[in-house]
Image: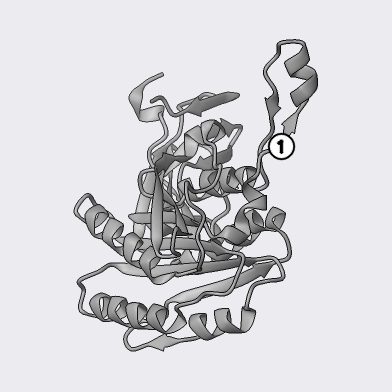
Amino acid sequence: MSDHERPVEPFSDIHFEEGHVRATLLHDPTVEGLDMAIYLDGSGSMKDEYKNKVKGGLFNWIFGKPPVVEDNMVEPQVRWILEYLATKDRNGELRVAYWACGDGTRIEVIGDLKGVDVQSYKFPGPKEFGSHTILAPAIRNYVEYLRKQVKQGAKRGCAVFITDGEIHDEEEVKRVCSNICREMARGQLPRTNFILVGVGNQVNEEQMEEICHEEYPGVGHLWCHRVAEEIGQISELVAVLVDETMTVAAGGTIYDDKGNVLKIYEARLPAILEFTVPEGCRSFTLEVNGQQFTQPLPKDEHHKEIARHH
């Protein structure tokens, strides 16, 4: 296969058959330069959710076999969120950390994790569960991380904070957010959004609304939030909130190689684009948010799927 037939970013796969094109997006081009993070509640009230179930412990011990440790309630949710958000992130890696640890102010950074490696990650909870739920240090931690990422090409930021209880430093959170927004307005920080996801019946939704409805000069709303009844619902909520918050373009437009419009996506772009090109068309162009991405098509070939080679 020649180089000109390989997918160009932001595409990962192109399938071309009898004029029909099926193009899969490697990442969402509407959020170019986005650097994301996930902060997991490490307060004491989360202990049960982080407990791993052990199957066959005594039985296996009698027969000399190691016990089978199953995922805790948090792990499958975080893996799904990480894998999804990595498709939005500029390099496919997300800062992941526990917050509200120790006295409630400590942050335990798990690492900068790759979305492609999600099945190998474990999330057993912090080393020291927190006695209070203090959010401001987690916000500062992300901003410090984002400043370093800006030097490496980050153009926009978004951090997701997951909690199961009441936040104990609401006024300090507002003060820190005011400072962040002033820096954004002066161009000292890139445009940043924060997402707060509450889970369970101990969440103070009225307080969350108070934090998230605050408007800041030159920025507007910095936060958005939702509440899930149980932890098994948070991955879907996070995906919806990120899509609503981070989509900066009203869809996109597909053109053929002569500049004719083939398809218009009025809402956000789907992960897979499907459309038909006229006979003899050699390439198509996706226009999103003022950017154009041109993808050559295979010459005189049908029933061929092109996969990105790493």
Q: Is residue 193 visible?
A: yes
Rate crowding at label 1 as few (under 14), some (14 to 19) or many (20 or more) other CA atoms within 10 Å: few
Residue 296: image x %, image y %?
Answer: 40, 36
How many numbered discs? 1
In the rendered image, which residue does mark 1 sit on? 53
Which amino acid lies under the numbered mark 1 shown in the image of this protein? Lys
Tell me the residue at 35%/60% (across/down).
142
Q: Position of residue 155 (x, y in %)?
A: 29, 60
* Residue 64 rendering spot, x and y as whole percentages: 71, 11
Q: Give the residue at the far right of this rendering.
A: 59
Looking at the rendered structure, the secondary structure element under dot 1 is loop
At horizontal 53% and vertical 86% (from top left) the residue drawn is 210
Q: Is residue 206 above or below residue 53?
A: below
The quadrant where residue 32 appears: bottom left
Which of 219 and 32 lies nearest the eye of the viewer?
219
Determine which quarter of the picture holds residue 227.
bottom right
Q: Is residue 267 visible?
A: no
Tell me: residue 170, above or below residue 75. below
Relative placement, left or right, of 252 versus 107 is: right
Viewer-nearest residue: 108 or 301: 108
